[in-house]
Amino acid sequence: MDKIVVEGGARLSGKIPISGAKNAALPLLAAALLPSGTSTFKNVPQLADVRTMAKLLRMLGWDVEGDSALTIAAPTGKKKPKLEAPYELVKTMRASVLVLGPLVARYGRARVSLPGGCAIGARPIDQHLKGLEAMGAKVTLDHGYVDVEAKRLRGATIVLDMPTVTGCENIMMAAALAKGRTVIENAAREPEVEELALVLNKMGAKIQGAGTAIITIEGVDELAPIEHAIIPDRIEAGTFAVAAAMTKGDVLLEGARPEHMDAIIAKLRAMGATVSAEAGGLRVKGGDIKPADITTQPHPGFPTDMQAQFMVLACLAKGQSVIKEMIFENRYMHVPELGRMGADIQVSGRVAVIRGGQKLTGANVMATDLRASASLVLAGLVAGGKTEVLRVYHLDRGYEAIEKKLKGVGAKIKRAKDA
């Protein structure tokens, strides 16, 4: 099993290319189930989760070829789709449930394993099923699987209990081929939801309002394959922005889109960094780090996927910062590992109090989830001595060659085999 080894103390300077967004790529690959023919996606990130989604599509009967440019061809002739996402794949990646809406919309049925909870807290799919039932689908739970059937989905008004991203995306894809109009209220507003709507519209769907709290979809009879380049990953960009800020560096994040990162940029500036948009992306320069209070919220609020990284930045500030995690109930598992490196963090429920200014020292630490992994790598960049981050398979789910990108701007970092 691999580990990441970091020697702290280097100042980061140079350019980091930002890969395609994982959270955009996964629903877009699922959307390729909707049309006949072959769709092509470019700027596809080389990540474990993307490989898992490609494997699932192949199991369903689609031909998937390529890497950073990926072609997805629908079954033809006597080759029939299988319409089932098995537990073996869904348990490794919750986003596998995104095939549910497209399969039911196009083929009238689907069987998908329930994803259950994950390390950062329970994330049920009740809103996905609520939407499909509102559109006329029959939903049956059977031995850990959900079976969904509908001769043809019909439009409906669906009010989500919370602005769930994957739930909203699943309903959007299903509604694209439903009969009549579907309205999603309290919709997720993330850039990745906008990206999915853009791609579905390129396929021939009729979707309005993506990026707002109300999305309207006029169903069509069929969709066509497309070619599309995936947007840059705002969370990867945010992670490297924090790395630049905490090392007092000067880094250009090539391809990053500032309009997708308003809340992240605002907190970086509040904590002492200089952030400026340039033609090639986003430049981040570090300065004297200041404490700040952060509350995670649905987009356009501060993203939960950046909470752990900013916690490390807060550890370097002279003064007290308070972080409130309002999205997931168990997303502070990096705190004990940061404590092993000398951080002073107290957690009570959803609130973490960080007393900054303590000197971090290198240690062997254990990654517990994707963003926690990134936070430990960041801590290693500024800790005295050597830090070894174990179980980096979490990291490989969401960051493409993170050690190579950081090494390219001066970090003393390498991937090694864990003995």
Image (cartoon, rainbow, N blue to C red):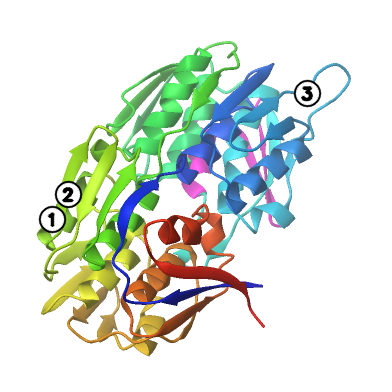
Query: Magenta includes 15?
Result: no
Compared to 16, does 92 lie above or below?
below
Which of discs 3 and 1 lies nearer the camera? The answer is 1
Compared to 349, does 267 lie above or below?
above
Residue depicted at 53% across the width and 43% down the height: 45
Residue under pointer 1 = 269
Q: Secondary structure at mark 1?
A: helix
Residue under pointer 3 = 75
Mark 2 and mark 1 in contact? Answer it, CB < 8 Å: yes
Residue type at mark 1? Answer: Arg
Q: Residue 191's x, y, as percent?
A: 34, 37
Q: How packed is label 1: few (under 14 Cα within 10 Å), some, or many (20 or more)?
A: some
* Image quarter of residue 278: top left
Residue under pointer 2 = 275
Compared to 29, does 217 lie above or below?
above
C-alpha gap between disc 3 and disc 2: 47 Å
Q: How packed is label 3: few (under 14 Cα within 10 Å), some, or many (20 or more)?
A: some
Q: Secondary structure at mark 2?
A: strand
Depth check, front residue: 186 or 233: 233
Mark 3 and mark 1 in contact? Answer it, CB < 8 Å: no
| Quarter in which the N terminus is drawn | bottom right
Which of discs 2 and 1 lies nearer the camera? The answer is 2
The span shown in magenta is 126-150
Residue type at mark 3? Answer: Pro
Locate residue 253 relative to residue 26 in the image: left or right. Answer: left
